[in-house]
Image (tube, grey):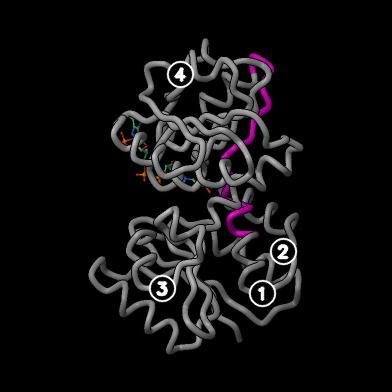
Amino acid sequence: MQVFGLIGNPVGHSVSPPMHEAAYEEYGMDARYVTFEPDQGSIARAIDGADALGITGLNVTIPFKRDVAEVVDPDPLAERIGAVNTVAFGGEPTGYNTDAAGVVRSFEHHDVTLSGRAVVVGAGGAGRAAAFALADAGMDVHIANRTVERAEALGAAVPNASSGDLDDLDAVLADADVLVNATSVGMESDETPVPKAALHSDLAVLDAVYAPIDTRLLTDARAIGATTIDGAWMLLFQGVEAFEIWTGRDAPVDAMDEALRNAL
Ligand code: NAP
């Protein structure tokens, strides 16, 4: 039997187990996906132990994405982002950041062409992944963040990027094609980090927040005719990408999507 899993703290409410196990069932794989909650100080031993036990792959979530990047061999994209959310074992443990692919594949799935200007709101883990992913896809990226120093630091690392705070979103969004909310604003609340007046109908808007699925930002964007993509798509495609890294096979996207949305 192959064992996959998720390490984070807490992981009790994760929807990754049903999403990945739907893929194993679809393909008739003898495999399980298990959640683990190591202590903050034992992440290096947890990775060594998983390797020694023959675990095939692990996802990594809060608060360990940066720590794991220090104890595995990150691929070039994960190294630039500075965070790992997927580890593949069997040889030197290698770290990947599939949140980046989660962003790009969410837009591609909705037939959004990634050219022109992208605005990423947020400069934490999700913001870093989105900014590098969209720049690598060929977009000019603007990073806006409440703490402007974090936006500036990220803007200096991402090719062709500019940065600022949240006060001039009106101006930076005027000629933007793509908007990503990579802050936690809107999570379990009716708040939005972007004023409705700053949105326009030519935007494609991805909200990384997936609880609730239909955030205030997406409701506002839909009301003015923008393309909207909810956070479950990003969650789906980061998992799809991880499955494909671990198995070398195309993932059964529809089965994973159905299981994920049933679990959310
Ligand atoms: P993080 O590293 O803690 O970053 C949080 C970000 O939110 C920072 O930019 C922070 O700004 C900003 N922020 C927090 N409270 C704010 C407020 N009241 N007003 C304005 N900005 C605020 O978290 P993360 O890992 O990037 O996650 C961010 C969100 O993305 C979460 O909701 C998470 O669930 C979601 N996410 C979704 C997926 C997916 O697959 N759908 C994947 C990863 C993350 P400061 O720098 O100023 O603190």
The numbered dot on residue 169 is 4
Query: Which quadrant of the render holds ligand 1?
Result: top left
Q: CA distance from mark 3 to mark 1?
A: 19 Å
Is residue 42 or residue 157 the one in the foreground? Answer: 157
Amino acid at the residue labelled 3: Val
* Circle 2/circle 1 CB separation < 8 Å: yes
Which range is magenta? 223-240
Q: Position of residue 60 (x, y in %)?
A: 44, 63
Secondary structure category for the residue under label 2: loop
Residue at 42% x, 24% y: name it: 191
Pointer 3 residue:
72
Label 1 beta carbon within 8 A of ligand 1: no
Q: Is residue 233 visible?
A: no
Q: From this viewpoint, which residue is outermost toward the top?
A: 197
Secondary structure category for the residue under label 4: helix
Q: Earlier in the sequence, mark 4 or mark 1?
A: 4
